[in-house]
Image (spheres, grey):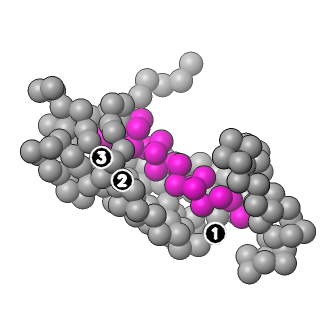
Amino acid sequence: MSEAPKGYYFEDLKTGQEATYVRRITDEDIRAFAAVSGDNNPIHLDEDYAAGTMFKGRIAHGILAASFISKVIGMELPGPGTIYMSQSLNFRAPVRIGDEVLTTVTVSELVPEKNRAKLTTRCLVGGNAVLEGEALVKVPSRES
C-alpha cells in the first residue's frame, strides 16, 4: 500500500519551503513514456540512431524529467488539490538511462489575494541542473 499523500493549505506555505523526489531513469520508463505520449523519436528509443547524434546515445524525453515536477507539486508541495496554472522549462542537459534525477520544488513567492504560489523547479543529475523553471499554482485554502 502506498503512503498517503502529503499536502499543505495555502496558509501553511512559507517562502523557501522545499520538497524533493528522486528517481533513477530506466529503459522501461522511457519506453512507457513513449507509449503513453506517442513521442517515439528514435533519439529516445533507438541506440544506433542516437549514437549518431550530438548526444552519442539515447536520452530520456525532457518532459519525462519534467513530469517529476508534477509529482512533487501534486503530491507533496503544495500537494493534493493544487491546480497547475503555468510552468516554464529550460532544458540544460540530457538525462540518460541510469541517471538518478533529483527533483526539487521550492516556494519562491506567495500571492495571498489569489491563493497562488510561485515555485522554483529544478531537476539535477549528479549535482548538475538538467532542467530549471518556474511554476505558478493555485493552492487550496482552509477558508474556501
How far separated are the C-alphas under marks 2 and 1?
A: 23 Å
Mark 2 residue type: Ser
Front: mark 2 or 1: 2
Label 2 environment density (alpha carbons within 10 Å; few <14, some 14–19, many ≥20): few
Q: Is residue 123 above or below residue 69?
A: below
Picture quadrant of residue 44: bottom right
Which quarter of the rendering shows the N terminus?
top right
Q: Residue at x 41, y 28 (%)?
A: 5
Q: Which residue matches tag 1? A: 94
Picture quadrant of residue 43: bottom right
**Image side of residue 63 versus residue 119, left or right:** right
Of 86 and 6, which appears nearest the observer? Answer: 86
For the residues labelled 2 and 3, say whether their Cβ atoms are less than 8 Å apart: no
Q: Which residues are magenta?
A: 58-78
Q: Residue at x 86, y 70 (%)?
A: 49
User: Secondary structure under badge 2?
Assistant: strand
Q: Position of residue 96 (x, y in %)?
A: 70, 63
Q: Which residue matches tag 2? A: 86
Q: Position of residue 19 (x, y in %)?
A: 37, 47
How far separated are the C-alphas under marks 2 and 3?
A: 7 Å
Mark 1 residue type: Pro
Q: Position of residue 131 (x, y in %)?
A: 50, 65
Q: Is residue 97 above or below residue 78?
A: below
Of 53 and 6, which appears nearest the observer? Answer: 53
User: Which mark sits nearer the N-terminus, 2 or 3?
Assistant: 2
Q: Which residue matches tag 3? A: 137
Task: Residue lying at the far bottom in this picture: please name it.
Answer: 54
